[in-house]
Image: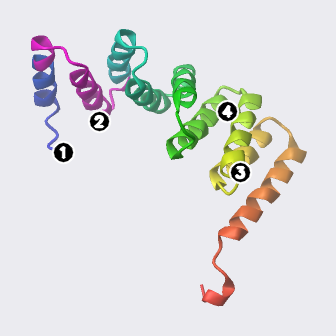
Amino acid sequence: SLNRFDEALASVNCAISRNPQPDYFYSRAKIFMKHGKLDLAEKELDKLIDSNPNDMMAHTQRASVAIRAKHWPKAIADLTYSINKSPVKNLSYYEDLLSRTEAYTETKQYEKAIADCKIGLKGQPEARQFHAALVKIYELSGNASEARRARKELETVDNDLQPPKSFGF
């Protein structure tokens, strides 16, 4: 990047004043994100979603911004939208599910976070991230027995991911 924030922003603002296309608002939001102005980026994405509530890209981008800004309720709403609209359970679906687990955990909605982890593990039983998240959630919620059980499952996954000793590693 050339770090020419002011020039880039001026160019996008000029383009918007001439012909307000959604792509320009995305560009402006990305410029704000790049320079750590998360509240301004979020407001740009709010405008896009207000004008087109079915804009999947805007919801996805705003969820990313909301997570970075620790605006958990907005992150949960946008991630829920993306998860519900996902046509297939692909990698993006599971990433959104894991991000929503984080947001639920940060807002102490442990039961919802656990439910998301279980959905994630049903589709990706070897996904270390969901196992590790379950351990953390059970520990934070004070459920020591489930935390121990989840930790054992995590250790099993970790052991399965190690190369065989016969490979000499």
Residue lying at 15% horizontally and 23% vertically, measured from the top left? 12
Q: What is the quadrant of the N terminus in the image?
A: top left
Q: Are marks 4 and 2 in contact (CB under 8 Å)?
A: no
Asked if 43 appears above or below 62 in the picture, the reply is above
Mark 4 vs 3, N-terminal side: 4
Tag of residue 1: 1
Q: Residues within 10 Å of mark 3 (few under 14, many from 20)?
A: many
Residue at the right extreme, as displayed: 145
- 1 or 2: tag closer to the N-terminus: 1
- Disc 2 marks a residue whose amino acid type is Lys
> Mark 2 Cα within 10 Å, few/some/many (few <14, many 20+)?
some
Type of the residue with mark 4: Thr
Q: Which residues are magenta?
A: 15-38
Decide which of 121, 148 is in the foreground and name it.
121
**Horizontal side, residue 10 vs residue 53: left or right:** left
Residue pictured at 79% horizontal, 41% vertical: 138
Labels 3, 1: front one: 3
Marks 4 and 1 sit apart, C-alpha to C-alpha, by 35 Å
Quadrant occupied by the C terminus:
bottom right
Three-letter code, disc 1: Ser
* Pointer 2 residue: 34
Query: Mark 3 = which residue?
Result: 131
Q: State if disc 2 and disc 1 touch (CB < 8 Å).
A: yes
Mark 3 or 2: in front is 3
Instruction: Identify the mark at residue 105; answer none if there is no mark.
Output: 4
